[in-house]
Structure formats: structure tokens, C-alpha cells
Amino acid sequence: MSGPVALIVGAGDHIGAAIARRFAAGGFTVCMGRRNGDKLAPLVEEIEAAGGRALGYAMDARDEDSVAQTFRKVEETVGAIDLVIFNVGGNVRFPILETTSRVFRKVWEMACFAGFLTGREAARQMLPRGHGSIFFTGATASMRGGEGYAAFAAGKAGLRNLAQSLARELGPQNIHVAHLVIDAGVDTAFVRDRIAAAGGDPDALPPDTLMRPESVAEAYWMLYHQSRDAWTFELDLRPYRETW
């Protein structure tokens, strides 16, 4: 396959899918990994029908062997990976007395440990070549803890510091590491259901109150094309109506 290769870890139905569509439209061969790899088939078909190149992989980002095997498959059968985007979530709300050790550990594995495995494997492939980009999707919880979000905030704050450590270490070796803070509700069915459950009407919100997944994808596209004399490490995105 021709063109640069991107690997999206955590290619879910919303932000991950939008990133895949954007980079495929820009000429990338897009490789996508998620735990239930069969769920990627419709997105692969959609991208290919639009003239792009896409492949899906069953990948558990919390499992060291699964991460290493996916990177190896892509490198051996598709080509050298130029861009890795870690987009695994873990946004769950539990009051502290309902936060079991199992919940806390699972959220940390998704939001932080999986990012470590992905970032380390990406560095392992990119360092010998002397170039590449590694981007991480963060959240409001990356910057501050919220009521009921102890597990998620701990995981996302850890991911942010992991990304910063990688940026300091790998940047001087020509590998661009960036962390994107999504300080907003993203326009998905999950978020709309949450708004409705809280007594609101998501359809009555003013335009652009929720962030479109496509807008996140455009931010990543912009980050990828930065010149190295002006690399961004951290970019925070929020709708114009978001209070902060």
C-alpha cells in the first residue's frame, strides 16, 4: 500500500472513526485497532468505498502482547507507521464509595496503562527511523478531578504526564508527541443520553454547544502538519459556549 501509515488505537464509533476518515481522505493508509475488531468492518468498507485505504485489527490496548503484535502486523504487512494516535477512553462516573478497586484498576488500565504500552511500542518502531508522530487524546479530567470521577481523572492525569515525559524524551529525536485535551461534551448518542437523563433536552442546545468528532479530527490533522520549529505539545479544544 502506498502513502503514509497511521495507526489509531481505540478506533471507536465517534472520535476514532472521524480521525480515521480524515486521515484516509488525506492519503493515509489507516490502520485501526479496537478490542472488538469485527465492529470495524463497516468503517473499513465506508473508507474504501470513498477511495481510501483502511484495515481493522482486534486489539486489546491493555494487553502488552496484543499491542506488540498489532504494531508488528502493521509494520510487516502494511508499512512503516508514521503516526500513532491513542484514543482509548474510560469515561465513567462512580461516587468514591462505589468505586471498587476493580473499577479503579480497569479505568487506569484503559486511560493510562494502555497509553504507556502504545507510546512505548510506537517509540520502539520510530526511533530507529528518526521520525514519527505520537498523539494522545485527553479530556477535562486530564487537568482537574471532578466529583465522581476519581478513577477517570487519575487515569487521564497519568496519561497527560506520560505524554509530557515522552515529548521531552523523544522530541529532540525528531518524534512529535502531543496531547489533546477535549474539554467538552462530544456530540455522540452517549452524551446526548446523559443530557436527557439529567433532565435536559440535547436538541434544544444552541448550535455548536457540543463538539463534533470531525472537529477533533481536524485538530489532529493540523497537529500532524506542524513544522518541527513550532511543534505543539498540548492543545485544548472546547466549544465557544463551554465554561472553563
Image (tube, grey):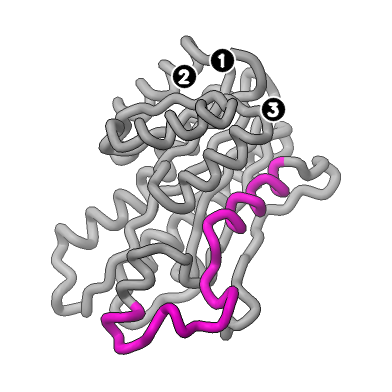
Q: Quadrant of residue 29?
A: top right
Residue lying at 41% horizontally and 16% vertically, measured from the top left: 73
Crowding near the residue tagged with mark 1, few <14, some 14–19, many ≥20 C-alpha atoms within 10 Å: some
Crowding near the residue tagged with mark 3, few <14, some 14–19, many ≥20 C-alpha atoms within 10 Å: some
Q: Which mark is residue 79?
A: 1
Outermost residue to the front = 49
Residue beneath label 2, please?
Answer: 74
Residue beneath label 3, please?
Answer: 131
Q: Are marks 2 and 1 in contact (CB under 8 Å)?
A: yes
46 left or right of 38 in image: right
| In the image, residue 180 lies in the stretch drawn in magenta | no
- In front of the other: 44 or 67: 44
Against 215, residue 17 (above or below) is: above
Span shown in magenta: 195-224
Q: Quarter of the image for the N terminus: give it.
A: top right
Against 218, residue 46 (above or below) is: above
Name the spot of residue 2 as percent of width and height, x first: 64, 15
- In front of the other: 237 or 170: 237
